[in-house]
Amino acid sequence: MSGIAGKIKSITESLPDDVRLVAVSKFHHVEALREAYDAGQRIFGESRVQELAQKYVLMPDDVEWHFIGHLQTNKVRKLVPYVSLIHSVDSSYLLECIDTEAVRVGRIVNVLLQLHVAQEESKFGFSEEDCIALVDSGLLERMKNVRVCGVMGMATNTDDMATVRVEFKKIKNIYEELKTGYFKDKPYFKEVSMGMSDDYSIAIEEGSTMIRIGTTIFGSREYPTE
């Protein structure tokens, strides 16, 4: 077995039972997704709302679509009908927008709180202090159609794996703080989405339950041309 199917098999066979693979399929053609699907992959990660919506109608109904990119509030309405999990909720206002649209279409939308632990200022996300403020604000109690299922984070883009490990530890520590605090009686709060092609083995060692892998499976991204 070679190609995409072989890579899917190699990765999934190496994963602990409690870790799921999100195949990051953004900028790849549906044919590549089909090959992954035929190899047993069911969770696909996209970062552009329009691209996800287009692929949604071309792929089988049992695909679980995860949104992993930065989400603009003006794109929420188009995303909510299709998505299974939004990894990248990085503000209270975005949470409110998702809840409003989820109420409108009569869905419960699962989300993760994106945490900012990396050294790059360009990355989005809540700080530890922001998470505490969110919980204390009472907003989560007021939202009826959003379910916060855990956290997501990215490490600094560096070859220094010691730094990466420290940052993954911080993500897991914030998760544990939330899990033993506000979310202690909420069994659905159980996901830690961290780890990509270059660092997922470290992420798993530090407690990831969901890894996001694209390049290792599909190869270099096929960016659209203007």
Image (cartoon, rainbow, N blue to C red):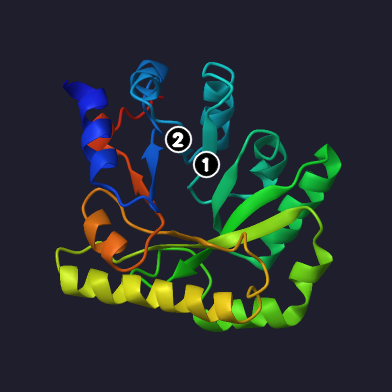
- Mark 2 is surrounded, within 10 Å at the Cα level, by few (under 14), some (14 to 19) or many (20 or more) other residues, namely many
- Residue at 25% x, 69% y is 164
Of mark 2 and mark 1, the one earlier in the sequence is 2
Instruction: Give the structural element (helix, strand or loop) at label 2.
Output: strand
Picture coordinates of residue 41, whole percent (x, y): 39, 30
Query: Which residue corresponds to mark 1?
Result: 66
Labels 2 and 1 touching (C-beta < 8 A): yes
Instruction: Name the residue located 27 percent from the left edge and 77 percent from the top edge.
Output: 166
Whole-percent x, y for residue 160 in the image: 15, 69
Q: Quadrant of residue 84?
A: top right
Q: On the rendered structure, is 13 left or right of 54?
A: left
Q: Is residue 187 above or below residue 29?
A: below
Which residue corresponds to mark 2? Answer: 44
Foreground pick, 215 / 93: 215
Q: Quadrant of residue 82?
A: top right
| Left or right side of 156 for 178 | right
**Badge 2 amino acid:** Phe
Residue 165 in which image quadrant:
bottom left
Residues at marks 2 and 1, CA–CA distance in whole angstroms: 6 Å
- Tell me the tag on residue 5: none
| Residue at the image position 31 percent from the left and 27 percent from the top | 222
- Can you give x and y, in whole percent of width and height, for residue 23 in the image? 37, 37
